[in-house]
Image (cartoon, rainbow, N blue to C red):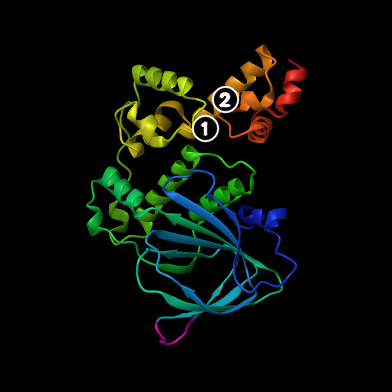
């Protein structure tokens, strides 16, 4: 768990020098065009009084890193309930409900950061129906506080690291993460719990014809911010079943497959043309030149400029 939370050592996550009076938002997915999922990272004050947490329509998952804190909350002037929260602890809120008052105090000199994930209830409902044919009106998430879950933490940290990039990945990345979150929450944190199981593996994945149609579509639209729904439509499956069958067929997620296609196109353009890197980035489906450079170096071990010089 400690290794998974090393993101808290990043420069962008260092607490401001001045003492905070309220939580400070410093990273957000608002500009990334993500669908079904909103991610926000906060620096938390060492001490806070009288903070009103309003009711949120969507499902909220909060991940704590850094210093421990003692948090207390109460509803409408009721009694305070206290809880200590430490590195890696999570809070799950199903959405809706009544507003409540919060106060907290740090238990160490180390600053606290939090990642807030807001997951669309519509996405969770659709996933429940696609995975197990459950009527979403019969399902209810159960609130949890101060618990740890390695998979939820792993997904949260991956999203957190992505937010730290100047150009976060687009819709396909976020939708894949949102789907993983939805499935895990449905299986482990609902009123029916273990009743929602993975459908048995079919004998076949996507057909060769479906893969050809899908690959051709991706190549034609590679410069666009592709979504999971749009790709699924090319095969006639729902988003969940498409992603599952795609991995069964190729051994990788749709996001990684599309990313590989983008890298290969950028590599080809770098080798065969002299067009500017900014143009290659757009033609290959990257947000900008810095996005292309970051991903290309991660995947190939050197920058696009270095690859072009050595072509």
Q: Quadrant of residue 191?
A: bottom left
Residue 109, above or below 135: below
User: Percent position (x, y) of residue 11?
Assistant: 72, 54
Question: Is 273 inside the magenta-drawn segment?
Answer: no
CA gap, disc 1 to disc 2?
14 Å
Secondary structure type for disc 2:
helix
Q: Which contiguous range is marked in magenta?
A: 76-81
What mark, if any, has residue 156 been given in the picture?
none
Give the mark toward the camera: 1 or 2: 2
Quarter of the image that includes the N terminus: bottom right
Residue 281, above or below 229: above
User: Percent position (x, y) of residue 48?
Assistant: 59, 78
Earlier-in-chain disc, 1 versus 2:
1
Whether residue 152 is visible here, answered yes or no, is yes
Identify which residue, 193 or 258, lies in the foreground: 258
Q: Residue at x 45, y 41 (%)?
A: 176
- Which residue is denoted by mark 1 in the rendering? 256
Whether residue 10 is visible here, answered yes or no, is no
- Which residue is denoted by mark 2 in the rendering? 284
Residue 224, above or below 7: above
- Position of 245 with respect to 138 (left or right) is right
Classify mark 2: residues with Cα within 10 Å, few (<14), some (14-19) or many (20+).
Answer: many
């Amino acid at each position: 768990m400690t290794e998974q939370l090393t993101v808290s050592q990043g420069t962008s996550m260092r607490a401001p020098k001045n003492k905070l009076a309220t939580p400070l938002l410093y990273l957000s997915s608002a500009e990334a065009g993500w669908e079904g999922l909103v991610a926000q990272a906060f620096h938390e004050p060492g001490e806070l009084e009288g903070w009103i947490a309003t009711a949120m329509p969507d499902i909220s998952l909060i991940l704590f890193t850094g210093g421990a804190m003692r948090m207390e909350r109460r509803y409408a002037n009721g009694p305070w309930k206290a809880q200590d929260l430490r590195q890696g602890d999570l809070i799950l809120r199903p959405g809706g409900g009544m507003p409540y008052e919060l106060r907290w105090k740090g238990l160490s000199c180390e600053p606290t950061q939090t990642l807030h994930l807001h997951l669309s209830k519509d996405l969770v409902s659709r996933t429940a129906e696609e995975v197990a044919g459950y009527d979403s009106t019969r399902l209810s998430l159960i609130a949890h506080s101060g618990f740890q879950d390695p998979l939820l933490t792993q997904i949260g940290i991956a999203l957190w690291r992505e937010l730290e990039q100047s150009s976060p990945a687009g819709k396909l990345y976020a939708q894949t993460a949102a789907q993983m979150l939805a499935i895990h929450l449905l299986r482990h944190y609902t009123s029916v719990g273990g009743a929602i199981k993975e459908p048995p593996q079919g004998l076949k994945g996507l057909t060769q014809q479906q893969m050809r149609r899908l690959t051709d579509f991706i190549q034609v639209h590679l410069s666009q911010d592709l979504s999971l729904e749009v790709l699924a439509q090319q095969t006639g499956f729902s988003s969940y079943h498409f992603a599952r069958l795609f991995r069964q067929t190729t051994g990788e997620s749709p996001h990684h497959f599309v990313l590989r296609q983008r890298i290969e196109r950028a590599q080809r353009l770098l080798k065969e043309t002299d067009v500017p890197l900014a143009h290659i980035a757009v033609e290959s489906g990257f947000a900008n030149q810095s996005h292309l450079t970051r991903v290309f170096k991660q995947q190939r071990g050197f920058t696009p400029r270095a690859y072009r010089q050595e072509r």
